[in-house]
Image (tube, rainbow, N blue to C red):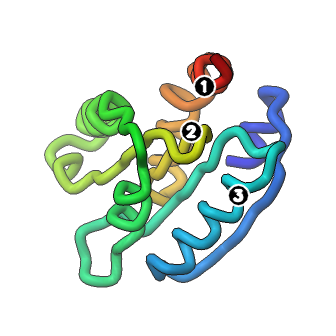
């Protein structure tokens, strides 16, 4: 993901690997949102349906405005790629304190699909809209 962002001219302000622990995820998002240079926050993994997967709830619960189309289109694209297991795909995006937040499954294929098809084509436009 970082390579894809950099290839598109985006600067990566931070990178963290943490356990799927809601309080830690919320803390890092809060911290990032307090940094002036951070315009977008991307979270990968922890979006499944097992008991240990809680990233989706942590991120989605923080969003002040949801970009519901992101999850809907991501699931549709996933369905085109892998079929019916796409119903277990939990991706979300929205706005938190003036920053766009994307949360996607952590598999390499899911990250690439989200980045190539949705995030990279719209990231600059979303950030521009948030500055208005």
Pointers 1 and 2 in contact (CB under 8 A)? yes
Pointers 3 and 1 in contact (CB under 8 A)? no
Q: Secondary structure at mark 1?
A: helix
Estimate how packed mark 3 is, as few (under 14), some (14 to 19) or many (20 or more) residues with alpha carbons within 10 Å.
some
From the image, state whether disc 1 or disc 2 is nearer to you: 1
Estimate how packed mark 2 is, as few (under 14), some (14 to 19) or many (20 or more) residues with alpha carbons within 10 Å.
many
Marks 3/2: CA–CA distance: 11 Å
Q: Secondary structure at mark 3?
A: helix
Q: Is 110 on the left or on the right of 18, as rendered?
A: left
Q: Earlier in the sequence, mark 3 or mark 2?
A: 3
The x and y percentages for residue 131 are 67, 22
Q: Earlier in the sequence, mark 1 or mark 2?
A: 2
Q: Earlier in the sequence, mark 3 or mark 1?
A: 3
Pointers 3 and 2 in contact (CB under 8 A)? no
Q: Which of the labelled discs sits on residue 130, or is there none?
A: 1
Q: Which of the labelled discs sits on residue 107, or is there none?
A: none
Residue to which mark 3 is pinned: 32
Residue to which mark 2 is pinned: 100
């Amino acid at each position: 993901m970082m390579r894809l962002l950099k290839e598109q001219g985006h600067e990566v302000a931070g990178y963290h690997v943490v356990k799927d622990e809601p309080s830690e995820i919320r803390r890092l998002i809060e911290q990032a949102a307090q940094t002036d240079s951070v315009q977008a926050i991307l979270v990968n993994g922890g979006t499944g349906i097992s008991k240990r997967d809680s990233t989706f709830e942590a991120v989605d619960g923080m969003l002040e405005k949801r970009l519901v189309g992101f999850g809907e289109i991501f699931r549709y694209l996933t369905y085109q790629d892998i079929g019916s297991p796409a119903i277990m795909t939990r991706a979300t995006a929205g706005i938190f304190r003036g920053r766009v937040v994307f949360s996607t499954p952590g598999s390499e294929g899911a990250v690439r699909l989200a980045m190539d098809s949705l995030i990279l084509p719209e990231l600059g436009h979303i950030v521009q809209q948030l500055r208005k």
